[in-house]
Image: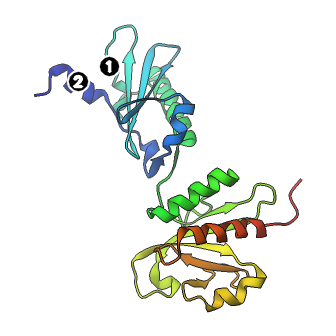
Amino acid sequence: MATKKNTKVAAAMSQSPVFSRLRVRPETLAAFGFRKSGRKWSLNKPLVDGAFDCTVAIEGENDVSTRLVDVATGEDYTLHLMPSATGAFVGRVRSELDAFLAEIAAACFERDVFKTDLAREIVAYAREHYGDELEFLWSQFPEDAILRRKDTEKWYLLIVRVPGGKLGLPTDGKVEAIDLRVPPESADAIAADSRLLPGYHMNKKSWFTIVLDGSVPKDEILAWLRRSYELAVGKAKK
């Protein structure tokens, strides 16, 4: 049976909408200052000129909770969780807490859109080898993103979640797929390979599509990714 103290603490913990549809990147947490205990990562920070001790706890991919403790009394502060609570002071508490959580989200989380292991491994490879992050450019297409080179700002990958029928597949269920640049000398081989499709929403003479369903092995995809990156050349912006 939960004790009265534990029930009170649970009531003081809150989930922030800042982390909705985001997924944690565990490799970033230690550098940001989080400490791990068991399966949980925790970080403390003083807020409002040290009046409150804020604890942010992360467990799993997107289970994030926050807790504010009044330093003077040692009691949990919950007024900021009440929509009806107004005033300059509670407004400052909310503002500083929201800013802190937004900083964590930007540094330690990513959009949780793509679900296949292949999609996540491709994104991780680009991050590790090129330092590039997905860019979600279209509010009307929140499940489409691109990767681009920093020096030329040219795209080398488009990743999408679309109904299979849009790719000519015999399914209306959503599939994950990537578009990559095609080297001119490989155009004929790509056209003859039934696993590879014409570029989705891109110039079909210079792009092709791979559905991330396992039909093309990861190592082969990464080789195409490296080639696509090399092809994304052009006059760099000054």
- As rendered, which of 62 and 129 lies closer to the eye? 129
Q: Quadrant of the N terminus?
A: top left
Vertical relation: 83 (above or below) 45: below
Residue at figure coordinates x 77%, y 66% from the top left = 230
- As rendered, which of 65 and 36 lies closer to the eye? 36
Q: How is the structure coloured here?
A: rainbow
Residue at figure coordinates x 46%, y 43% from the top left = 18
CA gap between label 2 and label 1 equals: 8 Å
Label pair 2/1, CB-CB below 8 angstroms: yes
Find numbered disc 1 in the image and state the secondary structure of the residue it sits on.
loop
Find numbered disc 2 in the image and state the secondary structure of the residue it sits on.
helix
Amino acid type of disc 2?
Lys
Q: Residue 202 location in percent, x, y?
A: 67, 78
- On screen, residue 211 versus residue 224, left or right, reads left
- On screen, residue 138 versus residue 70, left or right, reads right
Query: Residue at the left extreme?
Result: 1
Which corner quadrant of the image does residue 180 belong to? bottom right
Residue at figure coordinates x 58%, y 68% from the top left = 219
Q: Residue 215 location in percent, x, y?
A: 49, 78
Q: Residues within 10 Å of mark 2 (few under 14, many from 20)?
A: few
The disc at residue 8 is 2
Q: Residue 209 location in percent, x, y?
A: 60, 78
Determine which residue is flagged by label 1.
Answer: 76
Vertical relation: 201 (above or below) 42: below
